[in-house]
Image (cartoon, coloured by chain):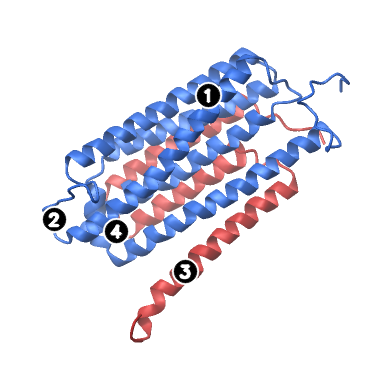
Chain colours: A red, B blue
Amino acid sequence: MPEHIVTKKTYFWIFAVLMVLTFVTTAVGMIDLGPFNVILALLIAVIKGVLVVLFFMHIYYSERLTQLVVVAGTLWLFLLLFLTSGDYFTREWLKVPGK
Amino acid sequence: MANHVPSLALRHQFGDVEQQKEASTLGMWVFLVTEIMFFGGMFLAYAIYRHLYPAAYGMGSNELNLILGAVSTAILICSSFFMACAVNSAATGQRIALTVFLILTICLAASFLVIEMSEWYDLHQHGLMPGLGFHTDKPDASHIQLFFCMYFAMTGLHASHVLIGIGILSVMTFRAFGGDFTPVYYTPIEVTGLYWHFVDLVWIFLFPLFYLVARHAAK
């Protein structure tokens, strides 16, 4: 399988999008949008993160096994986040002493 | 492919250069997944305390300098871009360009650290360093201190990764200048790139969580 060399031009466009998103997220952060501040900031961060992983870290061009490791790692992270926070956020629903 | 590749290019346990490179990349990704879990635990602690004490998080967040945070984000993204260019230069066999891009990456990493240290110093001057004479006039001081515990623990852990990255990049710069890498063998540059982009990736999430999302929660 011939390896894929990503051009500097591709890198530049990804870099440009990342910079624009950084500016947008900072500008949006200065305005009070209630709960949408959190949603927008996290959404933009996830878009930036995916761009970095796919192009700067070459996962878009990688072989299936490496892609699988990244997807499995992310799923495992969400298991950690969801199960533990699920426990914390629902504990007060039952008035059990010593919660 | 030429038969006379440098001895570093192919170790005898691998069938060909491509397989060797894929094995190294995969190994690095497994390491990075452990790092993601490592930081993930801290992000979780952040989220739980933010859920419990949103007002204290909001007041703590407003003590941070948003512009400095945005500038250091831009600096890290720039350094990631230069690192990506370094990987491209290595793959196309441009030795001088590779060396220059690595040096640029190190310079930006160092300036990121300088900005971060100045912000830490500033927070310390304002008495916001947990444990070292922490004091604030705002209500709920103990939970504001908790916010700064999270802030210094997470940015500190990230800064230590930046510092380690500068060390690795320096070694790579010397090796690159000495002509250690060819288009056939540049796996160390590729793997260093993965590490460096990971450091950038963590900051991409740290910046909104500390500087942006809690700002308006103080009311």
Which-is-in-front pick, marks 2 and 4?
Answer: 2
Confirm whether residue A12 shows in the render: no
Label 3, label 4: how far apart the Cα atoms are: 26 Å
Q: Residues within 10 Å of mark 4 (few under 14, many from 20)?
A: few
Q: Is residue A12 left or right of residue B124?
A: right
- Label at residue A84: 3
Label 4, label 1: how far apart the Cα atoms are: 45 Å
**Amino acid under label 2?**
Lys
Mark before the other along the chain sequence, 3 or 4: 4
Residue under pointer 2: B138
Q: Residues within 10 Å of mark 1 (few under 14, many from 20)?
A: some
Residue under pointer 1: B170
Q: Secondary structure at mark 4?
A: loop
Q: Position of residue B138 (x, y in %)?
A: 13, 55
- In the depicted structure, whether residue B94 falls above or below residue B165: above
Residue under pointer 4: A34
Q: Secondary structure at mark 2?
A: loop
Which-is-in-front pick, marks 4 and 1?
Answer: 1
Q: Is residue A35 left or right of residue B99?
A: left
Give the residue drawn at x 39%, y 48%. B154
Q: Residues within 10 Å of mark 3 (few under 14, many from 20)?
A: some
Callout 2 touching callout 1 (CB < 8 Å): no
Label 2, label 3: how far apart the Cα atoms are: 31 Å
Q: Nearer the viewer, residue A69 or B14?
A: B14
Q: Residues within 10 Å of mark 2 (few under 14, many from 20)?
A: few
